[in-house]
Image (cartoon, rainbow, N blue to C red):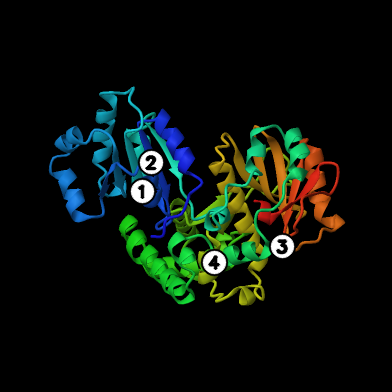
Amino acid sequence: MIKVQRNLEVTVQNLLRDFPIVTLIGARQVGKTELAKKVCPSWKYFDLENFGDLERIRMDPDFFFQENSQGLILDEAQECPEIFKILRGVVDRDRGKKGRFILTGSSSPELMKQVSESLAGRVALVEVGTLKANEFYEKPLSPFYSLFENQGDDVLRKLPQLTPQLSVAEVRSFWFHGGYPEPSLARNASFYQNWMEQYQKTYIERDIRKLFPRINSHRYQKFISILAELSGTIINRSELAALIEVSQPTISHYLAIADGTLIWRTLPGFSRSKSKSLVKMPKGHLRDSGLHHFLAKSPNLESLLRTSIFGRSFEAFVIEEILKGLAAAGITNWNYYFYRTRSRAEIDLILDGNFGLIPIEIKFSSKVEAKDLRHLHSFMEEYKSPLGLLVNQSMEVQRLSAKVIQVPVGLL
């Protein structure tokens, strides 16, 4: 895999100073292994999907960890669930020693169960996503995110001083191709298509079958394909169940699998108010825009822009860029939601943290009309938000009203 500077390197380094174990979780092929090796290049590395490495540990795990009590990267740790309890004992024998192990794992029920039950208090979890745009273009993380370390009023004052790092053309190209490191960095159209096809097959035929051996893989494949059309919407589970010819509980199970394997993100409905006018059903989207466009059979950007999904895809892409940016900047103690009322007033993303309650509206266009701000203003007035953001494809930060700021997507 082509090496690239990841935003999370500093985060992992900092967590290793505070915890004995750091676990990197993420979908397949997002760069977890390369990140671990980049942060700790001199550490011993064992791939637990490699039969030889796995057998070396299983032959005598107690002896293995006596010989390797620190400085160890264990890749795809979910393949050897018995090591978690052993690691707990290893850590507890010298609880004050930090930065001893990095585990990586493709998200799975078994991995999360073992981490939470066996290593609670001893491990820090880091979610690794596909590349963020600044990583692909070898730019530093935007200063936009550091503003959220402060209160909303400070953001309002400093935000207009920032300028976009990326052009509209650069953003659109990255949005179309997505952020899986190997195919996107190769910059080869034929390789990209072949890689995506094999990724789809591997995800269904290996990972899902292995994690959920009783699942009907044909129906799950059909479910994933339909998700490409529904990405960015509130899923009507009964309608989806009828399309795939399964029960509604099965659709709920499929959605939980897609979310748990980190290819799908569920956005909870904002529900701070007890108002009956709020739609509290969750919304969701495919996390990587490139995978979304491949599954939707859009061969190029021009064809994508002629489909009905491009607006929802762009919204999901911007949401992922923002959430990745906040995590990379080390901003903690925040949550995300989407907002919709029964009268169809909708806001694409609500951030709730120490910085305040911030509504964010996302528009594909570069121009702003008065109607684009109506729901932002209503939400801000009702919930006393310090500011609102409108993200679009403009090229300059601009104050649109007293507390609403236009943010170019190239700044994110």
Amino acid type, mark 4:
His
Q: Residue furthest left?
A: 59
Cβ–Cβ under 8 Å for marks 4 and 3: no
Q: Earlier in the sequence, mark 1 or mark 2?
A: 2
Q: In this rendering, is residue 222 above or below 406? A: below
Q: CA distance from mark 1 to mark 3?
A: 35 Å
Q: Nearer the viewer, residue 364 or 329?
A: 329
Q: Earlier in the sequence, mark 4 or mark 2?
A: 2
Cβ–Cβ under 8 Å for marks 4 and 2: no
Q: Earlier in the sequence, mark 3 or mark 2?
A: 2
Amino acid type, mark 3:
Phe
**Residue to which mark 3 is pinned:** 364
Q: Is residue 306 visible?
A: yes
Q: In this rendering, is residue 151 above or below 324? A: above
User: Is residue 245 found left or right of 75 in the rendered image?
Assistant: right
Query: Percent position (x, y) of residue 271?
Result: 66, 41
**Residue to which mark 2 is pinned:** 23
Q: CA distance from mark 1 to mark 2?
A: 8 Å
Q: In this rendering, is residue 232 above or below 142? A: below
Q: Nearer the viewer, residue 327 or 333?
A: 327
**Eye-nearest disc, 4 or 1:** 4
Q: CA distance from mark 4 to mark 2?
A: 28 Å
**Residue to which mark 1 is pinned:** 105
User: Is the residue marked by circle 4 packed among few (<14), some (14-19), or many (20+) residues within 10 Å?
Assistant: many
**Residue to which mark 4 is pinned:** 177
**SS class of the residue under badge 4?**
helix
Q: Earlier in the sequence, mark 1 or mark 3?
A: 1
